C-alpha cells in the first residue's frame, strides 16, 4: 500500500491567498497526517490505498477552524437568555460557573467535541478553566486544539505557574494536535500589571496570548477614562503584542486600533452571533481585512450562542457586513469561506499547515453533502456552502489523517454516554441561589 487513505471523486474546495479554487471530479490522497496529492479522479489505482472513501456528490474542503470558544459552556446552553451583558455575566454566567468541577468540565468538553465534529470543525481555540480535562477530552475526540487556561490575575503567581505547568504537560502533545496559549481573560477584568506579567511569561515560554478585548463601547470608554488609551492600545502598552496575540471580538476597534493590530500581525476571532445576542455591536471586519489583519470566525461559548455551528457564523458574518456597509458586494462568497478556514489558520499562526486542501497540508478536512432539498439545485458550489448548507450536511470529518466521523457516525466518541453524563449534571450546574460569583463585570 502506498497511501493510507484515498477519497474518490469529490468536488474540491481549496481556499487560499489567491481566492477559493473549486475543482470537480478530484481524488484526495493522504499518507499519515498529510495530504500528498489532489488530482483528477481515475489516476490512482484504488488498491494502492489502505482505505477508500467514495465521495460522489460531496464537497471536500478544509475543516472549519473555530478561533474562539469556551467549549465546556455547552453545559449552560439556554440558561441566560434575553439579558444585557452586565446581568448576563454577574447574575448568570459567573454565578453558575462556580458550580463547575473538573469532571463537569471534562464532560462539557466531550459534548462540545461531539457537536463540533458533527458540524465540521476540526480545530478550536478554546479559552476556559481546568484545561487539563479539556485537553483530555479533545485528545480522545481526535480534534486539534489551541488551549488557553483563563486567568483573572487574582492570584498572579499561582495562575502564571499553573499555565506554565499546563504548557509543559500539553504543548505539542497528541502528535502536535494540542498547542497551549496564555489566557488572560480581558483588560477589563485583569489588572494592568498582571497583563504586563503575562507578556513577560509568554515571551519566556514561547507561547501566544488569547484574550477578550473591546467587546462593547462601554469597555472602550472606561479604558479611555482610566488609561487614556483604548483596550487594544492597552494590550500593546502592556507588551502583549510582542508575540503571537489572538484578540477575541475587537468589536469596537478604532481605526488606530486596526492600524496597530495590522502592524503587529494580531489575529482576530470574529463571533457575530454573540455580538447580536448581547446587543454589543458589530466588528469592522472589512476594515480589518483591508488592513491585512487575519480575521477568523469563532462560535464563542454556547451560553451566548446556543450552538457550536460555524456555518451559521460564516453566514451571519457575510450578511452583517453587507448590511453594515449597505453594499450587497461586501464580503463576497470566497472571503466568507476563507474566513472559516485559511484565515482562521492565519489568526492562529498555522497558515503553513492548516486551512487549505492542498498537498503538504495537514489532512484536516471534511466531506459535505450537497444533495439536500435545501441545497439543490447547485448552480454555484461556493453559494451553496455559504448560504444553504447546514451543519447536519457534514458527512465525514478527518483530522491528522484519522477519520473521526463517517456517514454522520461518530467514530471516536460515545455520544450516548456523553449525553447521559451531561444530563445528570444539568440541574445542579445552573443553580444561582448560593450567592457565589467567579468575577464581577463592571460596565463603568
Image (cartoon, rainbow, N blue to C red):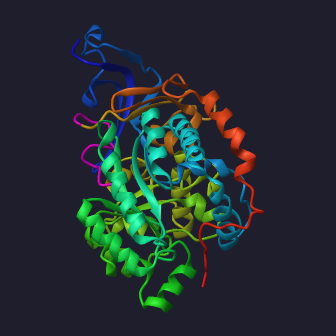
Residue 63: quarter of image: top left
Q: Residue at (26%, 71%) from the top-left corner?
A: 242
Where does residue 387 sit, x and y in percent of width and height?
55, 45
Magenta-colored span: 348-360
Q: Is residue 192 magenta?
A: no
Which quadrant of the figure has residue 207? bottom left
- Quick one: 370 or 126, which is closer to the camera? 126
Q: In the image, residue 245 lies at what x, y percent?
A: 34, 65
Measuring from the top left, give residue 53's x and y in whole percent.
40, 18
52 or 127, which lies in front? 127
Please give left or right for residue 156 compared with residue 99 in the image.
Answer: left
Residue 354 part of the magenta-drawn span = yes
The secondary structure making up most of the magenta span is loop
Residue at image coords 41%, 52%: 147
Q: Position of residue 441 (x, y in %)?
A: 61, 75
Front in this rendered view, residue 417 or 371: 417
**Residue 408 against residue 43 in the figure, above or below:** below
Visible residue check, residue 74:
yes
- Decide: is 290 above or below 132: below
Amino acid at each position: 500500500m502506498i497511501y493510507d487513505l484515498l477519497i474518490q471523486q469529490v468536488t474540491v474546495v481549496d481556499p487560499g491567498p489567491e481566492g477559493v479554487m473549486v475543482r470537480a471530479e478530484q481524488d484526495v490522497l493522504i499518507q499519515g497526517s498529510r495530504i500528498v496529492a489532489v488530482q483528477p479522479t481515475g489516476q490512482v489505482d484504488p488498491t494502492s490505498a489502505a482505505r477508500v472513501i467514495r465521495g460522489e456528490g460531496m464537497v471536500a474542503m478544509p475543516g472549519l477552524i473555530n478561533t474562539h470558544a469556551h467549549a465546556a459552556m455547552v453545559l449552560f446552553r439556554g440558561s441566560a437568555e434575553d439579558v444585557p451583558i452586565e446581568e448576563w455575566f454577574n447574575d448568570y454566567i459567573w454565578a453558575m460557573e462556580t458550580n463547575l468541577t473538573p469532571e463537569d468540565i471534562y464532560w462539557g468538553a466531550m459534548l462540545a467535541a461531539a457537536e463540533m465534529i458533527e458540524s465540521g470543525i476540526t480545530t478550536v481555540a478554546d479559552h476556559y478553566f481546568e484545561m487539563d480535562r479539556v485537553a483530555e477530552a479533545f485528545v480522545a475526540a481526535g480534534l486539534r486544539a489551541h488551549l488557553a487556561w483563563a486567568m483573572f490575575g487574582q492570584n498572579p503567581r499561582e495562575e502564571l505557574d499553573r499555565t506554565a505547568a499546563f504548557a509543559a504537560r500539553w504543548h505539542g502533545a497528541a502528535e502536535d494536535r494540542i498547542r497551549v496559549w496564555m489566557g488572560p481573560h480581558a483588560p477589563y477584568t485583569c489588572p494592568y500589571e498582571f497583563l504586563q506579567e503575562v507578556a513577560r511569561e509568554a515571551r519566556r515560554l514561547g507561547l501566544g496570548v488569547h484574550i477578550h478585548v473591546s467587546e462593547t463601547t462601554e469597555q472602550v470608554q472606561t479604558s479611555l477614562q482610566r488609561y487614556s488609551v483604548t483596550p487594544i492600545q492597552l494590550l500593546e502598552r502592556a507588551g502583549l503584542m510582542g508575540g503571537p496575540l489572538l484578540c477575541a471580538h475587537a468589536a469596537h476597534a478604532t481605526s488606530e486600533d486596526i492600524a496597530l493590530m495590522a502592524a503587529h500581525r494580531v489575529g482576530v476571532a470574529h463571533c457575530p452571533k454573540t455580538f447580536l445576542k448581547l446587543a454589543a455591536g458589530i466588528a469592522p471586519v472589512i476594515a480589518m481585512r483591508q488592513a491585512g489583519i487575519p480575521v477568523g470566525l469563532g462560535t464563542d461559548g454556547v451560553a451566548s450562542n446556543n450552538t457550536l455551528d460555524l456555518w451559521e457564523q460564516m453566514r451571519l458574518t457575510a450578511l452583517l457586513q453587507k448590511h453594515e456597509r449597505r453594499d450587497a458586494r461586501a464580503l463576497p462568497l470566497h472571503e466568507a469561506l476563507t474566513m472559516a478556514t485559511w484565515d482562521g489558520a492565519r489568526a492562529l499562526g498555522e497558515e503553513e499547515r492548516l486551512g487549505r486542501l492542498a498537498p503538504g497540508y495537514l489532512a484536516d478536512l471534511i466531506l459535505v453533502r450537497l444533495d439536500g432539498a435545501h441545497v439543490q439545485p447547485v448552480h454555484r458550489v461556493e453559494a451553496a456552502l455559504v448560504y444553504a448548507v447546514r451543519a447536519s450536511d457534514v458527512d465525514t470529518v478527518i483530522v491528522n489523517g484519522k477519520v473521526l466521523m463517517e456517514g454522520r457516525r461518530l467514530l471516536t466518541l460515545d455520544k450516548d454516554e456523553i449525553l447521559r453524563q451531561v444530563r445528570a449534571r444539568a440541574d445542579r450546574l445552573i443553580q444561582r441561589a448560593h450567592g457565589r460569583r467567579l468575577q464581577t463585570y463592571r460596565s463603568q
